[in-house]
Amino acid sequence: MLTYIYLKDIEDFTILTVKCNKIKGFAMNTFVPTRDDALNLLKKYNQKKGLIRHALAVEAVMGHFAGLFNEDEEKWRVIGLVHDLDYEMFPGEHCQKCVDLFKEHNWPGDYIRAVISHGFGICTDVKPETNLEKTLYAIDELTGLVASAALVRPSKSILDIKAKSVKKKFKDKSFAAKIDRNVIKEGASLLDMELSELITQVISGMRPVAEKIGLKGSL
């Protein structure tokens, strides 16, 4: 008989999943989500163009950073793509409702933990611990700031923007005021990176998908 374990704390869920997988007769979760799985799941719960573009931007940047850290690029991209899975339909339960949604689709516990850790200090108490989690936490808000800064340029493009231009907008708290600068600064600290370098790498990660995320502009 298959036993499902539902736990409030995702860290306990992950630990118990590992332990239970070693128990004879327990159905081990061997599902490894692909990009197609992630994209289909994203579109099941999100239809707004802006949210899809943000997901694609975060996916691209996560892939870029995976390369810098010499880690699993596919996994990082997949998690980046679905990081805001519950935001459109359940904004008041962001980083909480997604736990149920992922479990319904048999997603692994470490993928779920990574997703909800990006809401640390805002809507969850799950602290980013791994390089993947720290990166997602650091770059999520920053991709929004970079996109906003690019759109006010004459070219409306990310292809010609420099880190110093974004950093100037970062200091102007009236610009894209909803973007939490403290999260970005804390994220840079977690990654042990200077803010300018973090911005530079985020721009580099977003450029290859400029057209898909609406930031190719006139270039």
Image: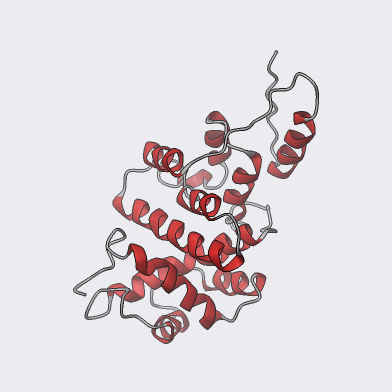
| Observer-nearest of 65 and 218 | 65
x and y, in percent, of residue 93 in the image:
53, 44
In the image, is 39 to the left or to the right of 189? left
| Observer-nearest of 171 and 78 | 78
Q: Going 39% across and 83% down the picture, which residue do you hit?
A: 162
Q: Is residue 178 visible?
A: no
Furthest toward the top, the residue is 1
In the image, is 19 to the left or to the right of 151? right
Corner quadrant of residue 134: bottom right
As drawn, 170 above or below 106: below
x and y, in percent, of residue 210 in the image:
31, 65
As drawn, 151 above or below 101: below
In the image, is 165 to the left or to the right of 31? left
Corner quadrant of residue 218: bottom left
Placement of the C terminus among the 4 image quadrants:
bottom left
Q: Going 80% across and 34% down the picture, which residue do you hit?
A: 19
Placement of the N terminus among the 4 image quadrants:
top right
x and y, in percent, of residue 203 in the image:
42, 73
Q: Going 45% across and 38% down the picture, which residue do you hit?
A: 37
As drawn, 71 above or below 146: above
